[in-house]
């Protein structure tokens, strides 16, 4: 199954909304961990997920978050 790097970005004033969007949203990502640059001033979040396609990957996110997220299909490669 393909992997997707979900790269979410929001404005500084949208931080609270980006986190509040998860309340009541059922997802295997909820209550998990994500890489974030919010506390460093970047206002981005990243998840690595397994999904059949981009649409399925975005469905793991609440609407507010998904509409601001770029799903990038990725594969692991060995670095020589």
Image (cartoon, rainbow, N blue to C red):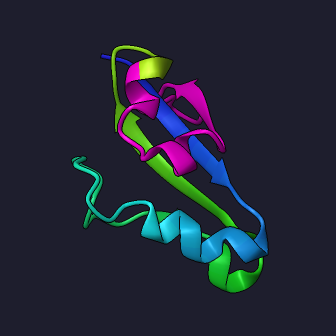
Judged from this view, the residue extending furthest toward the bottom is 39
Q: Quadrant of residue 13?
A: bottom right
In the rendered structure, does residue 64 fall within the stretch colored magenta? yes
Please indicate whether residue 37 sits to the left or right of residue 19 in the image: right
Quarter holding the C terminus? top right
Q: x%, y% of residue 71?
A: 57, 31
Screen quadrant of the N terminus: top left
**Percent coordinates x, y for residue 30 in the rendering:** 27, 59
Residue beneath the point at 37% across and 61% down: 22
Residue 38 within the segment the image draws in magenta:
no
**Residue 23 sits above or below residue 68 on the image:** below
Horizontal and vertical percent position of residue 4: 48, 31
Question: Which is nearer the eye, 46 or 8?
Answer: 8
Vertical side of 61 occupied by 32: above or below = below
Identify which residue, 8 or 49, lies in the foreground.
8
x 49%, y 20%: residue: 54
All told, the count of numbered labels is 0
Horizontal relation, residue 35 to residue 60: left or right: right
Residue under the image location 58 percent in, 59 percent down: 45
Residue found 42% across the figure and 44% down from its top: 61
Q: Name above or below for residue 10 compared with residue 74.
A: below
Please state the horizontal and vertical placement of residue 9, each as a whole percent of the image: 70, 55
Residue extent of the magenta highlight: 56-80
């Amino acid at each position: 199954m393909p992997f997707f790097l979900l790269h979410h970005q929001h404005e500084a004033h949208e931080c609270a909304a980006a986190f509040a969007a998860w309340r009541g949203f059922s997802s295997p990502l909820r209550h998990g961990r994500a890489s974030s640059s919010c506390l460093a001033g970047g206002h981005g979040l990243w998840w690595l997920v397994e999904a059949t396609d981009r649409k399925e990957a975005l469905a793991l996110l609440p609407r507010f978050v998904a509409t601001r997220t770029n799903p990038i299909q990725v594969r692991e490669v060995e670095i020589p």
